Image: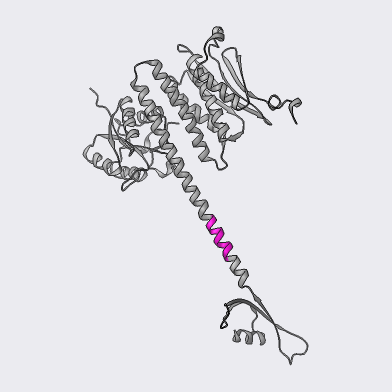
Amino acid sequence: MLTRSVVLVVEDHPLIRLSALDLVSSGGFEGIGAQNADEAIAILEARPDIHLVFTDVEMPGTMDGIKLAHYIRGRWPNVRLIVASGKLIVEESQLPHGAKFFSKPYGDQSIIEEMTRMLAIVDADSPIGQIPSSQ
Amino acid sequence: MISLLEATASGAAEVHAYELTLDRPGHEPRLLVLNAKRLVYDDISQTRILLAVADVTEARANDKIKDNLLHDKDDLIREKAILLQEVQHRIANSLQIIASILMQSARKVRSDETSGHLKNAHGRLMSIAAVQTQLSKSSMGKVELQPYFTQLCKSLGASMINNPDLLSIEVHADKTSTESEVSMSLGLIVTELVINALKHAFPGNRKGKILVTYKSDGRDWTLAVTDDGVGMPTIAADAKPGLGTNIVESLAKRLEAEVQVASANPGTAIRIVHSQAAVNPIGRAA
């Protein structure tokens, strides 16, 4: 049996996190939740099988989602990144190369499509910079 | 000061806007501006200096007040922008919570009908959220219809079109921007009509296109949603109108517009027409 891709959901609001985890599993992936950047890093250290991190931007703790995204890219360069925020000032240029930004409220379908696209090439272990554009 | 005047007298220099504070016991200090120039006449045995002294104490004080006010105003504007961003952020988060729960419920329920209703509710919510997004991008509190309808239809398509190869939604709006309230009503009408077309116009695996158009001419405008699907059933006359129809009717009324339903051969065209002449007939004016 094929192992399911593992997605880490980082979101401080419990209801949004719960729904996001449900969304992840409805997309056929295994979801793990973290409520802030520190928890996310601890999980990433313990679970080398995480392929994608889906993070909020505004969170309490030492890092916001943008800093977390850069930190993850530095330490685990093969982990795919999706960032969502209610603030519209976030530009993809502020994010690590290849990371995708969605403004809140995001459409569930768009998130699943992006995850599927990003994870389709995990097996090929291609470098992040070569993720084909969705456009 | 003395040495400056001496230099002026000798012709070596001139005094330009030299500032000094005049302190006298028992008086408030006065701020003076001095200008001095040596006057040269034929009679060179005499040295003459033209000295102008201006008291600028009050003028400077006023300038300072003005500067402070301008500074305060900048601070207030900055503060307002930050607050506005914070509010938008909170609205987005609240909408996200509702959107997430609606979609989670839609995935959980077993009945297709219930799931459909929950997805429709999600679509309506996203339509209102799209106004927020467009509003925060504009500075005048107005929403440009083309990008707004485009965002709206993209999100409706993403959640309601199962096979994007079969069905597509196109938006053609002119350059019109409308007040947020009006935009929201127009957006909700588009949402209902698009949901309706997606639900009824393309049974089975029928291929097709939904076209959303908006044209204005002076104060008259027409919003139309046209599909090339199977068309309206003829027996619909006594059918009970659904929630979608009620929403469209009441929003159109609020916008002082008329709902016109026509056959598009193939498909259906629904037009929401606002005509100034119909709202204010000449006989009723004045």
Residue B265: image quadrant is top right
Which residues fall within the magenta stretch?
B64-73
Could you say where residue A65 lies in the image, as x and y percent from the top left?
35, 42
Q: Position of residue B205 (x, y in %)?
A: 45, 13
Residue A88 visible in rendering? no
The answer to if B145 sits in the magenta stretch is no
Q: Where is residue B224 in the image (x, y as percent from the top left)?
A: 59, 22
Asked whether B88 or B174 is in front, the reply is B88
Q: Which of A4 and B61 is in front in this view?
A: B61
The coloring applied to the image is: one colour
Horizontal side, residue A18 vs residue A48: left or right: right
Rendering quarter of residue B43: bottom right
Between B133 and B64, which is closer to the camera in this rendering? B64
Position of residue A6 relative to residue B202, above or below, is below
Q: How many numbered marks appear?
A: 0
The residue sitting at the right extreme is B42
Q: Quadrant of the C terminus of chain B?
A: top right
Visible residue check, residue B93: yes
On the rendered structure, is B218 left or right of A28? Answer: right
Q: Residue at x 53, y 55 (%)?
A: B74
Q: In which quarter of the image is the N terminus of chain B?
A: bottom right
Q: Looking at this view, is A72 or B257 the one in front?
A: B257
Residue B46: image quadrant is bottom right
SS assignment for the magenta stretch, majority? helix
Residue B69: image x %, image y %?
Answer: 56, 59
| Residue located at (49% from left, 20% from top) | B195
Q: Does the magenta stretch include residue B70?
A: yes
